[in-house]
Amino acid sequence: MSQNTQTSSAYAIRVRAGRRPYGAYVRRRLVNSVFVVLGAYTLGFFILFLLPSDPVAIMLDGSGSGLYVAPEQLEQLRERYNLDRSVVEQYLIQLFSAVRGDIGYSIQFNEPVTDLILRALPATLPLALLAGFVALVVGSAVALAAQGARASWLRTLFESLPALGASVPVFWVGLLLLQFFAFRFPIFPPIGNDGWRALVLPALALSVPSAAAIAQVFSASLSVALAQPYCKYAKAKGCTHWQVLVRYAAKNALPPVIGILGVTAGGLLTGSVVTETVFTREGLGRLTENAVTFQDIPVVQGIVLFCALVFVAVTLIADLAVLALDPRVSLDAKGSRA
Amino acid sequence: MTLENTLPTAANRGGADIAVRLDERDGLPARLWRSTRFVLPVLAGLVVFTVVLWALFPWYFAPQSPTQTFPASRLLPPGAEHWFGTDYVGRDLYTRVVHGTRVSIGGASLAVFIGFLIGCLIGIPSGYVGGRTDEVCMRVIDVLLAIPSLLLALMVVTVLGPGTGNAAIAVGVSLIGTFARLSRTEVLRCRSEAYIEAAYLAGSSRFYTLVFHVLPNVSGTLIALGVLEFGLALLSLAALSFLGYGAAAPTPEWGNLVAEGRNYIAIAGWLTILPGAVIALLVVSLNYLSRRIAGRH
């Protein structure tokens, strides 16, 4: 996330607002993003390939066939996955093919991992987007209600809702929704991928933790903004509490919320593992679950790489948006946030 | 995710003082609500205490066998005889929840222990030494936080395979990033305080200062985070176990109890609602207590 905020030097030369060195900032952030993706890939490689286990054995054992495999065949398999080479060689070979867009073949389906992920996405993307939208709307509404309510008991109620949302298991929420809105009152279908009706319940379940996180962050930053002099001034001029909140505080309290969008996106993508299992949907989550169960290492690594890419891209866009929208953020000559 | 955001900040706490000043003008709902300030910590403490007792002495609270089946009394709804009802082979669900406590709590403890230890080993030197060390550690933390925690846990499960211990290790690995970041921030904040400078002036060595001045001052926040993370570890562990990567079947564990009940959701809702509610209640209580520890109000 925005690690640059903490490393700014006290001796940095402030550049006047309006002449901010965007180029240097964007370059720095791009380099940083590439590093994070590379780091995630490397971490994935080391966890998945370097731990004392034989991927070929896992591969044959994981498929549950229990077949006898001739030693020559084992050798062939090892050669095919470059397992007969040294670790560094393996890592470099994989890294270079990954840079070219080839992240390997699924052991289970014998198909390129990229194809598998691209085929799963059309089912998961609408789910994640709808859940993200619901999370944004509900999360912001709860935060505004918590800061807008005058009665202290109402305020405490809204302030404790996010903590509640962050504490309930997602699969449990999903099963409760299923029980009430698919079985007791059959409004929505309990399983499947067909149409928008099948999307509603999974999206609601998936949105709960993200909504809770957004509400927590927004509520905290709203309360900071409300204590600022400009809000007191607006109030002194005769604005009502809600007018101050919506017109002045909300706008200034947005950057921290935009700052957690990357984490939210990653959470929504991986949250689909649980949600899609509960609602028996096909998609990225099911692909992940399947790959983990059958120890399909290239697929797991491909998904890790994909999630890291999404996280980095969303975080980068969000940070640039904050920079463009928020005149309070200034940059020093080297392009780090001051 | 954004866990340290859930701890109350100084700005949040300001609101409580104002609320206290307005107290005299409040009506009945407000007065009822205010009484919860004293009742809720006790209730949350009771929930945690009960669960700890369940984990320590399961046979005292549920003397029946958690795995013996009674086909004659299958799928009975909750009642006086079976508090939580019975499952599809007639096992008492309350018994299974009580006997599953030790596995779930033990797993979450192991996970928090791993995350806390390794996280602090990265975060504290990073914040205290600073410079090049800090740069390197920060990059590692960035990478750890860029991978969603459930995915990180699933990666470890892929290699280690399913099982209670493995799932706990996996969740522990997924907690490292958060602990590392918060311990670094806390040490960094503490290092710039005047009393640390005073300690140096008094002739205290860097290491002595770290152990006797810095660590005691950051431990409060870290313990509050530990309690909060314990709840989240419990949730992640339950999710892994729900997906089938935890304890193997007949052994009861909170997550796989919900997963077993899933097949009977249309006819026996209690099989999923009640074990899930126990998880939710415990995590809510831990979350609440953690905020009270952090906020000290």
Image (cartoon, helix red, strand yellow):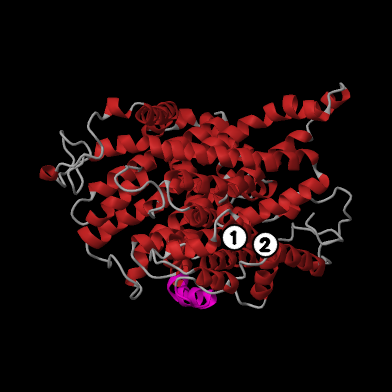
In magenta, the rendered stretch is A109-125
On the question of residue B131 being in view, the answer is: yes
Q: Which residue is drawn at the image coordinates 35% and 30% (left, top)?
A: B54
Badge 2 element: helix
User: Can residue A119 be found in the magenta stretch?
Assistant: yes
Which residue is nearer to you in this view: A107 or A126?
A: A107
On the question of residue A258 being in view, the answer is: no
Q: Residue A119, relative to residue B289: is it above or below?
A: below
> Which residue bears the numbered disc 2?
A87
Task: Measure how far apart labels 2 and 1 are at the Cα level.
Answer: 9 Å
Q: Give the main secondary structure of the magenta stretch.
A: helix
**Where does the image place residue A220, in percent across and percent down from the top left?**
58, 46
Q: Which residue is drawn at the image coordinates 74% and 64% (left, top)?
A: A29
**Where does the image place residue A30, in percent across and percent down from the top left?**
73, 67
- Taking the image as shown, residue A88 lies to the left or right of residue A304, namely right
Badge 1 element: helix
Q: Residue A167, relative to residue A283: is it above or below?
A: above
User: Can residue A152 be found in the magenta stretch?
Assistant: no
Name the image quarter holding residue B211.
top right
Mark 2 and mark 1 residues within 8 Å of each other at the beta carbon: yes
Residue at the limit of the structure toward the front, as seen here: A71
Which numbered dot is residue A49? 1
Which residue is nearer to you in this view: B250 or A249?
A: B250
Q: Amino acid at mark 1?
A: Phe
Number of other residues with Cα within 10 Å of mark 1, as a class: few under 14, some 14 to 19, many 20 or more = many
Which residue is nearer to you in this view: B134 or A84?
A: A84
Q: Are marks 2 and 1 on the same chain?
A: yes
The chain ID associated with circle 1 is A
Q: Residue A265, relative to residue B78: is it above or below?
A: below
Number of other residues with Cα within 10 Å of mark 2, as a class: few under 14, some 14 to 19, many 20 or more = some
